Image (cartoon, rainbow, N blue to C red):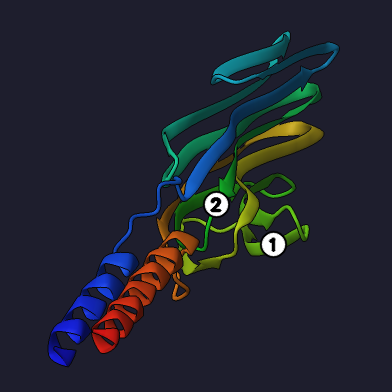
Amino acid sequence: MRIRQFCVLLGVVLSANALPVSADPVTLVSVSKTVQLSATAGNDTQTFTGSEGTIITASSGPDFSTVGGTIGAISTLARNIEGEGSAFVNHSSATTASGGSASSEFVVVFDANQALEYFFGGSFAARSDASHTASWHAELVNEATNTSVFQFSGTTTPLFQFTRGFLDPGRYTFRAGAASLVPLQVGGGTSFADFDAGVALSAVASPTPEPASMLLLGTGVAGLFARRRMQRAN
């Protein structure tokens, strides 16, 4: 009889621990894509702000500044977030100052509804002439503590970054972007940067049983003790 009761108790424990978690471990809150461009040549200035890629050109006689940016979301599934973008400035001026700026940024806000494991990977590139600037960045921020889980930035081309770790439940913001800047000057040159970065998220099994599991386990144990007491009484 004790062997049978032990087998029943073991079955209750295993079935209790195998109960699935109904809530989705990750919830997407928002996804945004932004491109900001500004081109200047002489007295001509062109600007653009939007969520899609474009190219603008400012010109003054033979002088010009061409600026462009692209942004895209490769995947915005709750557990697989990835975006890509680029920014460039190309200018030439012999008689008047020209230059410009370009930036593209991909931002995703999500809620970790339970402990998560994350895997981050990113491919980045940046190049520019003297006195020009090209850069990229990627960051995951814990909004509750306003601290970075990880942060990468640079002006190197090409470069691949990878890291992994764990997240506590809470709200997080993932952002990645590229920027190019050419200050107003006489002369010519280019500035270019791009990124392709993403975060994969997976649930971490909690070592502590869920309340429903504990209730089921407690009910099973109580039933076994009640049955044993009835047998003794008989």
Residue at the outermost front position:
234
Q: Can residue 205 be seen in this view?
A: no
Give the camera-side residue of 5 and 181. 5
Where is residue 133 shown, x and y percent of the image? 70, 46
Left or right position of 9 against 219: left
Q: Are marks 1 and 2 in contact (CB under 8 Å)?
A: no
Rendered image: mark on residue 113? 2
Q: Which residue is drawn at 69% across and 24% down?
A: 37
Where is residue 227 shown, x and y percent of the image? 28, 77
Give the camera-side residue of 42 and 178. 178
Secondary structure state at the residue bearing disc 1: strand
Left or right position of 215 against 97: left
Where is residue 25 shown, x and y percent of the image? 46, 50
Three-letter code, disc 2: Asn
Which of label 1 and label 2 is nearer to you? Answer: 2
Left or right position of 196 against 150: left
Q: Name the residue under label 1.
A: 148
Q: Residue at x 44, y 45 (%)?
A: 24
Secondary structure state at the residue bearing disc 2: loop
Rendered image: mark on residue 51? none
Where is residue 98 shown, x and y percent of the image? 77, 25
Three-letter code, disc 1: Ser
In the rendered structure, which disc, 1 or 2, sits on the residue that comes first in sequence? Answer: 2
Give the camera-side residue of 141 and 102. 141
Name above or below for residue 61 compared with residue 15. above
